[in-house]
Structures are given as structure tokens and as C-alpha cells.
Amino acid sequence: MKEFYTRQPDEIELFTHNGQTDVIIRRGIQATQQEIEDGGTQDIWECDETQFRYPGILSYEEVAAQVESWLVYAGAESLSALDQAKQTALRSMSEACNSAIRAGFNIELSDGKPHHFSLEITDQITISILAGKAAAGQSTVPWHADDEACKFFSAADIAAINAQMEALTTYHQTYFNSLKQWILAVDSVEAVNAIQYGAPIPEEYQSEVMKAILRAEG
């Protein structure tokens, strides 16, 4: 079936649960443009997508090595409407999780002013490296907040930035993990579609780490 994404999807995606593997294979992925309400356009990716469930655990390498064979297998093992809704929801929630992390955070530093730091992957890596240098004894490190000139941050400031980054990424990754358990457990398409990113997760689907984070928030 034809599917559309707001960012380039993976050619192969796997979700394992209860000793089974839900497999998504995408062919002919290509970028195109879509009109939006304000009259402009946005980049989207379209592809032909096949989904199926395998009664066992598969690795990415196993699927990638024999894509055509798995597509033949999929002809007889297509996912139900409920399972397709769950996989669509999981992809959407994963994108929402990543977007929330990339959006970053605001923090007030030792200068008494608020600063915003976005968290693209390269930003996360750099902040972590700089925090390591500061922890090793370097008194200042060069970096920049969003839309600000590069400057030297004190060891205390870069440590605070790193701590805020780790808290944000840990929260959203942990939240998504528990959200995934909730989505996989519901028993109707309507229930799946009603779940939104950011909604309170029922306690029975909260991981131990999620519960600990919520207790700390208080």
C-alpha cells in the first residue's frame, strides 16, 4: 500500500513483542512535495509499504538479506487492520518523541539570562563531549545557544546544560517505551487512534523507570 511520511523513513523497520516480529518493508522511497494550507509546500516521502507479522524473532540483517522472499511471505501473512493501526501509531509516536527531543529546552545559566538549546544528534554529541572535558578539569568550553554567538561556557554551566539534556532525552525515551506497551496492549483500532503523544500513560503500562520519573516530578 502507498504511504506518506514527513521525513525519510527506513527501508526496513522491525517491532518485536511477545516472541513475534512485526515487519515493515518500504520500496520506492522518493521525496516529493505536498501543498499545505497557507499555499506553500512541504517535503514529504512516499513509498510502497508492506507489513506482516512473523511468529518468531527476526533481525534486520535477516530481512535485508532476502527482501523479495519476505515480500512473498507477506502476501499470506498481512497484518490485520488493528495491527496496522498499531504500527502506524508507533511510527507516529516515534517521530513525536524524536521531535520533542530535537526541540531542546530553555535554561537559565550563571549570567542570569534564559538560553535555548536545540538537540539535534550532533548537538547532543557535542554537549556530551564538552561536559566530559569540563568534568576532566577544563575550566571553560566553547559552545553556543540557539541564535547566539559562540562563547566560552564555564564548567558549571556546561554541566547544567548537559544535565538538562540528559533529563529531557531520558524522559522522552522512557515515555515512548511505556507508550509503546500501551499501544500494543489495546484491542481496537478506535482505542489505538485515541492515544496521543503526551497523554498520561495508565499505570499498568508504565515501566519502572517511568514510574520513578513521575514520582520524582511529584
Image (cartoon, helix red, strand yellow):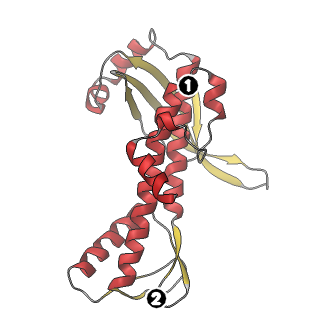
Q: In the picture provided, is 38 more to the left or to the right than 9?
A: right
Q: Amino acid at mark 2?
A: Ser
Residue 99: image tag: none
State how far apart marks 2 and 1 are (Cα): 47 Å
Residue at the image position 42 percent from the left and 66 percent from the top? 165
Front position in the image: 52 or 152: 152
Circles 2 and 1: CB atoms closer than 8 Å:
no
- SS type, badge 1: loop
How crowded pointer 2 is (Cα within 10 Å; few <14, some 14-19, many 20+) is rated as: few
Q: Amino acid at mark 1?
A: Val
| Label located before the other in sequence (2 or 1) | 2
Residue at the image position 35 percent from the left and 77 percent from the top? 159
Residue at the image position 40 percent from the left and 82 percent from the top? 157
The answer to whether one can see residue 21 in this image is yes
Front position in the image: 63 or 101: 101
**Residue at image mark 1:** 186
Which residue extends farthest left?
136
Expressed as whole percent of the image width and height from the top left, the position of residue 51 reads 47, 23
Expressed as whole percent of the image width and height from the top left, the position of residue 22 reads 41, 24
Which residue extends farthest top?
76
How crowded pointer 1 is (Cα within 10 Å; few <14, some 14-19, many 20+) is rated as: some
Vertical comparison of 144 with 192: above or below: below
Front position in the image: 172 or 16: 172
- SS type, badge 2: loop
Expressed as whole percent of the image width and height from the top left, the position of residue 28 reads 48, 33
Expressed as whole percent of the image width and height from the top left, the position of residue 63 reads 31, 26
**Residue at image mark 2:** 110
The answer to whether one can see residue 142 in this image is no
